[in-house]
Image (cartoon, grey):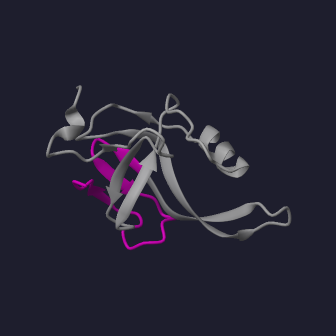
Amino acid sequence: MDGSYYWNEMIIHKCEAGSFWEFTFFCPGCKCGHGFKTSSWPMPSGLSEHQQRMFNENNWGWNGDFGKPTISPSLNVLREIGKNEKGEPVHETICHSHVISGEIQFLGDCKHELRSKTVPLEEF
């Protein structure tokens, strides 16, 4: 559906070229956007070695529907909480979810009030 991301019912947004993420959606649990990319999205310039590794290791499948998206596998949003003995970032999960048919299913390891609940994705 070419151009479907311009519809008012849009839940998934296409990011501009050069962005780390290819698509974003609003997370009602975190009250901010979360991003994902498919394997065809080109790596932006200027990334650190760690960011390049994370970019290459993280790809999702998407059904192409901007209004009722399904994204797989799950999205695990992490926060850096320190460094290990090698100086590499150490992370913890702050939001972990499945997006299926326009709904976001929050898993039990989320740190917000929607943990273990399923809610419709909101326009963003």
Q: Residue furthest left?
A: 8
Q: How many marks?
A: 0
Q: Residue 30 vs residue 111: left or right?
A: left
Task: Give me the residue at 65% from left, 49% from top.
Answer: 51
Residue 86 at x, y = what percent?
85, 61
Tell whether position 117 is magenta: yes
- Residue, x 52% and y 54% (percent of image)? 76
Please determine whether, in this image, residue 79 is positioned above or below residue 104: below
Instruction: Tell me the residue at 35%/31% (across/down).
Output: 63
Q: Examine the structure image and report whether residue 66 is included in the region drawn in magenta.
A: no
Q: Looking at the picture, how far across and down is residue 19, in whole percent?
A: 47, 45
Please state which of residues 121 and 45 is positioned toward the viewer in this rendering: 45
Asked whether, in this view, residue 3 is left or right of residue 118, the answer is: left
Expressed as whole percent of the image width and height from the top left, the position of residue 40 reads 50, 28
Region rendered in magenta:
98-124
**Where, quadrant-wise, is the N terminus in this rendering?**
top left
Residue at 14% over, 46% down: 8
Residue 118 image point, x, y percent: 32, 57
| Residue closest to the far right | 85
Judged by its main secondary structure, the magenta piece is loop
Does residue 56 appear to the left or right of 107 in the view shown?
Answer: right
Q: Is residue 87 above or below residue 66?
A: below
Frontmost residue, 80 versus 98: 80
Q: Quadrant of the C terminus?
A: bottom left
